[in-house]
Amino acid sequence: MVTEETVKVIEWLGDRVRLIDQTRLPQAEVYLDLTDYHDVAAAIKELKIRGAPAIGVAGAYALALGALHVKAATRKEFLKEFEKIKQAIASTRPTARNLFWSLERLAQVAQTSSEDVARTKEALVNEALRIHAEEAEATLKLSEFGAALLKDSSAILTHCNTGALATAGYGTALGVIKWAIKQGKHIRVLATETRPLLQGARLTCWELKKADIPATLITDSMAGYLMSLGKIDGVIVGADRIAANGDTANKIGTYTLAVLAKAHNIPFYIAAPTSTIDLSLASGKGIPIEERRPEEVTGFQGVTTAPADMAVANPAFDVTPHHLITAIITEKGVVGEPYGEGIKEICHVQAG
Amino acid sequence: MVTEETVKVIEWLGDRVRLIDQTRLPQAEVYLDLTDYHDVAAAIKELKIRGAPAIGVAGAYALALGALHVKAATRKEFLKEFEKIKQAIASTRPTARNLFWSLERLAQVAQTSSEDVARTKEALVNEALRIHAEEAEATLKLSEFGAALLKDSSAILTHCNTGALATAGYGTALGVIKWAIKQGKHIRVLATETRPLLQGARLTCWELKKADIPATLITDSMAGYLMSLGKIDGVIVGADRIAANGDTANKIGTYTLAVLAKAHNIPFYIAAPTSTIDLSLASGKGIPIEERRPEEVTGFQGVTTAPADMAVANPAFDVTPHHLITAIITEKGVVGEPYGEGIKEICHVQAG
């Protein structure tokens, strides 16, 4: 077990949820105590908490919190309200698989519950806590598996934020990097700033500073050039949804890094807990890609960077086809081509 | 001749230089009247005027302005001061070939001048004016040549700013796009924002709005994904220096777009006047790449986007090898592989 003191990204406090407002980082460390599930849902929508695994945990707590406050005399009444709350939370963000995965886990608990509504509420809170604990443990496990793939004295590029903040655990891609460094490997870390919302500059750099890990910040547009100079030996990123064939949705810009890595013969890794895998989708084509507000592209924190009313494209994610991925690192092991079989295996699906 | 009313990017006003401060766009249109060549040199250094061809014009005016104010009784004294001023202007920015090209043109005039210092000063001003006129004319010519390459009903991506602001003329890559549209072609224009200094968002979008050309702004990280969706049919960019073999230095991020274009089988064009070509360099390896201040990457216009003291890489340009370039468009014609021969030909160099 890793004992490192990490930031408390999200916590269940019996009757409320506490989370650090990630939109305020790195300038201010502000914690929000939320007693209404609507506020947790809004926090997800507004990216106060973000990162696929962390959204999964936040969604579970939001649903448990909502369920706790339901006034229902009968199981039937309770389940009706529960379903409404679940739908509201499910509608916050479309791409990250983990959100739907954890809502379904709580729905299972509700569906198989007894007539005693109070006990059901308790069971739902416990399931949310279990999801958080299991997911945090999964990020530790996958970080250990992934660290074995990173070569000593190599320069590793990561994109967006995939550390404690993104996972409410140890991290996915950033967890792998941290573990390799903890093992004594000399890793030169490069982080893309990750426009438009700058999760790399704001959050990854903040986490690396806290962990006392030196890193070099670059704009997204610099990765290719640095690869051409031989200054990047590998790329590792997280995932928001992985299809059954290994196609992976992740933060916009990931696909470009995968194409560049292939062109420069550099390994390109995805790191994610299995809760990110969506076996219902045969390929990445079916993954819903969130289109966000134009203002994210035309400015930053009140500074306008483009003329008013510019037309904008703002897909928050892109899809990287499996053939550009060297390996997918999960808590159940590392999967490579053929992804279809490997993914089935780690998800314990019977083949044929 | 195109009669369109374009912005007066830089003007010679007899005893001073007037230029629009490009660091203030798109929020404010501020014109600066500069009577001291040091101020013009500072304007180049601080990117108040930028873009390789425009830097060439500004450098010529700066040197003419400096020469005008030299107090020298003899030709020898004058040439000594002239050389000092030339060195000061040459040291402002290292990558754009056009600056050195135009300084050399003025140096030729000075070297071959008569004993009459006043007449030499006049000849230098005239040479600077000639450079501006010829370069502006060159951008019109190359825009016409390039427009023939753009297919009707296609979506064309451009990077950074290469319009009037970057050239003190019609434009290079953006000139090609504008001319194609003027010809009646339906071109869907996409512009990258171009971090760190956002010349795409701030300047290209501003120029396109002025020209009433609709366009879609994207972050640099989105180009790959849009190509994978079939939403980009071609890429056209400018150049800061072109080596004898066609390798091209241009705004950071250009190389990534070239790799992406190749991976998606999309044409990738460079548009530049021949003043950008540096026959003294056999390949792109010798092109000096300017490394700029870390603050450009850790923030934008007073907004800090990363923790204090983050290590940063900030190369302002990258080098695209000629094999990724479909064609180089100049005012002397369009050159393709083998670039070595084609470039020699348009530069009127005797082969063998």
Image (spheres, coloured by chain):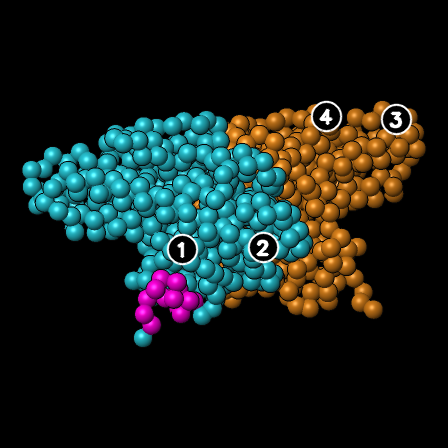
Chain colours: A orange, B cyan
SS of the residue at dot 4?
loop
- Residue B249, numbered label: 1
In this rendering, the label closer to the viewer, 3 or 4: 4
> Which chain does the numbered disc 3 sit on?
A
Residue kind at label 2, given as amino acid type? Leu
Does any portion of residue B27 appear in the rendered image? yes
Left or right of A297? Residue B93 is: left
**Image point (36%, 57%), residue name:** B277
Residues at discs 2 and 3 in contact (Cβ within 8 Å): no
Q: Residue furthest front?
A: B1
To which quarter of the image does residue A38 belong? top right
Would residue A318 be counted in the magenta stretch?
no
Residue kind at label 4, given as amino acid type? Asp
Quote the CA–CA distance across marks 1 and 3. 68 Å
Q: Residues within 10 Å of mark 3 (few under 14, many from 20)?
A: some
The percent position of residue B45, horizontal first and vertical second, equals 32, 39
Q: Which residue is mark 2?
A: B150
The percent position of residue A39, horizontal first and vertical second, equals 69, 27
SS of the residue at dot 3?
loop
Q: Which residues are magenta?
A: B339-351
Quote the CA–CA distance across marks 2 and 3. 66 Å
Foreground of the two, A198 or B50: B50
Asked if badges 1 and 3 are on one and the same chain, I answer no
Quote the CA–CA distance across marks 4 and 1. 55 Å
> Which chain does the numbered disc 1 sit on?
B
Q: Residues within 10 Å of mark 2 (few under 14, many from 20)?
A: many
